Amino acid sequence: MHKKRWIGGGCLLLLFGIGWCAAQAWSSHAGEQALERLTARLDAREGWQASRHDVEQGWWHSSGVLRLETVVVEGSSLRVALPYHVRHGVLSSHLDGEAVVTRAGETLLAADVAPTWQATYRTLSGDMKGRLTWSAFTSRGVLPQAASLEVGAGELMLNGHAGDVRYHLRSAPWRVSLGEASLELGKFDVEGRHRGDAQNFHHSMDLSLASLAWHEGAPFSLNALDFEADLRLDDDTFGYHGEGNVANIAVAGQSVASGRMSLGLERVDADALRALIARIHEKGLGAGSGRDVASVDATSRWARLTPLIVNVLRDSPRLTLETLQVTSEAFGIDSRAFGELTLDGDESASLMATPVTSPAFWRHLQQRLDGHITLVDAPALLALHLGLPPETPRLVFRVDAGQWRVNERALRW
């Protein structure tokens, strides 16, 4: 009896071991397929080439190098090598590695400041969670000319699966210097979510920026800036909604104003927008003339995009200014604006005869503009400049077929 129990227990252990090994092999295979899909998606992105090298695959461990390279017409491409190591488990695989960035054979980041990354791939759900971290560093090889880039320490976290990815980027201040001029980007935090693909998507983003300052002559800065954006591209239309707020605008260290704005864009033809984006990204842009892309000037390339740009307008896009609030104690201003503008897209085929690079195109486009914008508690100097009494409390700007009026008086720009 005891012997039968031992035999039965042994068989169970054997079956369990076989099942465990099979699950481990399947997990290793699933992890390898996920890396192949990731490489293919990166390689399909415009402007990048992606490939894997030195791949060694095993049941328990795998390793290799993921290489990314920018596609450039002129100059040296930027190359990013991502050596990785994978520990395979039955329910998940864990990856880690670092990033080696080079240009023209020169390493841009020293080994002690090279970014490091970790990721976890869930075998059953296909979810992935990743984290990229970097230390503060200074580089002169990333930007053109003699510009210097100082990057603050930070991290980027990703979570989700193909078609639904959340991200969170946090970083200490950055600084770009060119001679005596410099642009400083204060501590920032960006959080968002992207659902869908390149054809149909919904993207939302929240940005918090401590400061944005330009130093040359009289310093100029935006402080405590917050911005939210929501973009949707579905089968029929593209829409955008954004809200921004800046707590303090300063010139030469003196506070001059603060403000907030909320606006939306709708009725943009989705198919036309996709066609336009695809044409812009098309590597063979300009090939129809028998010349290389590098030999075709930007003006000619944009001129050939005219029919596609006009098609984007055929649903009569509408821009809505929900609110614009500007407050300035220094200038005695506390004004608010709201309104909407519509671009008439009916019978727009006539616009295609004139290239977008011609001033005549924009004159014809202006003639299709209709709408109104109301400014409440307008600055007295603005009212005087427009030929109205300085105590005018409300300015109503109206445009009809491109002709502007303010408080029913013709407006000359």
Image: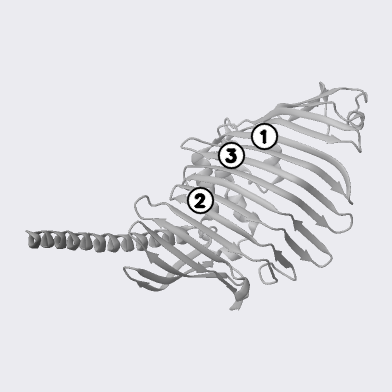
- Residue picked out by circle 1: 263
Is residue 191 shown left or right of residue 199? Answer: right
- Residue picked out by circle 2: 278
Q: How crowded is the residue under tag 1: few (<14 C-alpha within 10 Å), some, or many (20+)? A: some
Dividing the image into 4 quarters, which one contains the N terminus? Answer: bottom left
Residue 398 coordinates in the image, percent (x, y): 75, 25
Q: Residue furthest bottom?
A: 105
Is residue 315 shown left or right of residue 249? Answer: left
**Rendered image quadrant of residue 370:** top right
Picture mark count: 3
* Tag 1–tag 3 contact (CB < 8 Å): no
Q: How crowded is the residue under tag 2: few (<14 C-alpha within 10 Å), some, or many (20+)? A: few
**Rendered image quadrant of residue 391:** top right
Is residue 191 shown left or right of residue 249? Answer: left
Closer mark to the observer between disc 1 and disc 3: 3
Residue displayed at 52% across by 53% down: 158
Q: How crowded is the residue under tag 3: few (<14 C-alpha within 10 Å), some, or many (20+)? A: some
| Colour setting | one colour
Of residues 332 and 13, the one drawn nearer to the viewer in this rendering: 13
**Residue type, numbered disc 2:** Ala
Query: Compared with residue 112, is residue 31 higher up or lower down, i.e. above or below?
Result: above
- Residue picked out by circle 3: 230
Of residues 106 and 374, the one drawn nearer to the viewer in this rendering: 106
Query: Compared with residue 21, is residue 400 higher up or lower down, i.e. above or below?
Result: above
